[in-house]
Amino acid sequence: MNIIVCVKNVPFTQEVDLVLDASKQDVKKDNLVYVINEWDNYAIEEAIRIKEETGGHVTAVTLGKEADEEVLRRCLAMGADEAIRVERGDLNPDASMIAAILSAVVKTIPHDIILTGVQSDDLNNGITGSLIAERLGLVHAAVVNSLKISEGKAQISIELEGGQDEMSQVTLPALFAIQTGINEPRYVSIMGIRKASKKEIKVIDASGLGLPGEDLQPSLIMEEMFMPPETEGAEMLQGDAGSLADQIIRIIREKGVSL
């Protein structure tokens, strides 16, 4: 069983006052600590668990610079067998470009299962896994919160709205975008990180993958970012249904929306 897990190093922004950089197209990241993307942490744990149950080989792949190898070291310390970093150079990839680059790498590696996180903490697009599957022509499922492998098939549970789950059986190879809570990611010790630091990480240059020029151009153009304005807080409405409806209509009209 060959399993590939796409992971990402993301800035830890909880309890941090974010400041826009001079371009107003990103936030200042110089003093931010980077960690493995939360959803990807569950994905690599799930890959290791499948390997322990059925045997196989786990490869962790990331698109980033040399500093992003830290996330691969963590994957190796958790139990991954191999790690690949795709050097992005001066590229500023969006979800579409990330999918193009990662799919070009993944298709050269034997795989039965590809795992990604449902989304990333920094961009929150939630589409990279599906775009990779589309490029590779793979069956795929997103928001997977249960995954059992048996005889070339996967029994999966997908989280739906309203607390509902959908059960499906999928024939491998396939790609699954993993939801948080599917497992409990294992603790990675300092000793494990030290041992992983001695393992080789293969580096591939994104510019040498032979992708057409349009695949190395972002599909989404960021013109400007801005911090949300400070407000006085929520206005709580009270009354019966008819009174509430009248109040809502009044507020909508005051905001300049024609009904």
Image (cartoon, rainbow, N blue to C red):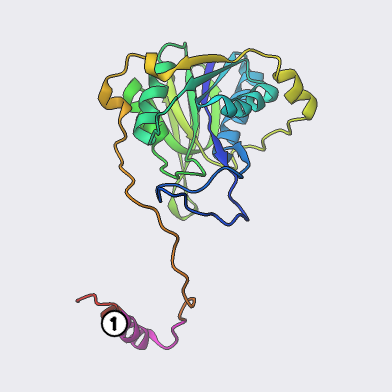
Q: Residue lying furthest left in this view? A: 258
Give whichever of 99, 53 is nearer the camera: 99
Amino acid beneath label 1: Glu
Q: Position of residue 149 (x, y in %)?
A: 54, 23
Q: Quadrant of residue 216?
A: top left
Nearer to us in this view, 193 or 50 = 193
Residue drawn at the location 41% of the way across and 43% of the way down: 125
Q: Residues within 10 Å of mark 1 (few under 14, many from 20)?
A: few
Residue 176 shows in this picture: yes
Q: Please determine whether, in this image, residue 178 is positioned above or below residue 47.
A: below
Residue 233: horizontal and vertical position, in percent? Answer: 49, 76
Residue 42 as seen in the image, left or right of residue 163: right
Query: Magenta stretch?
Result: 236-251
Horizontal and vertical percent position of residue 232: 48, 78
Residue pictured at 61% horizontal, 45% vertical: 31
Q: Residue furthest right?
A: 191
Q: Along the horizontal axis of the image, is 138 left or right of 81? A: left
Is 14 within the magenta?
no
Magenta segment main secondary structure: helix
| Snapshot quadrant of residue 258 | bottom left
The quarter of the rendered structure image containing the C terminus is: bottom left
Which of 213 and 50 lies nearest the eye of the viewer? Answer: 213
Horizontal arrangement in the rendering, residue 183 relative to residue 111 (left or right): right
Q: Position of residue 47 (x, y in %)?
A: 58, 25
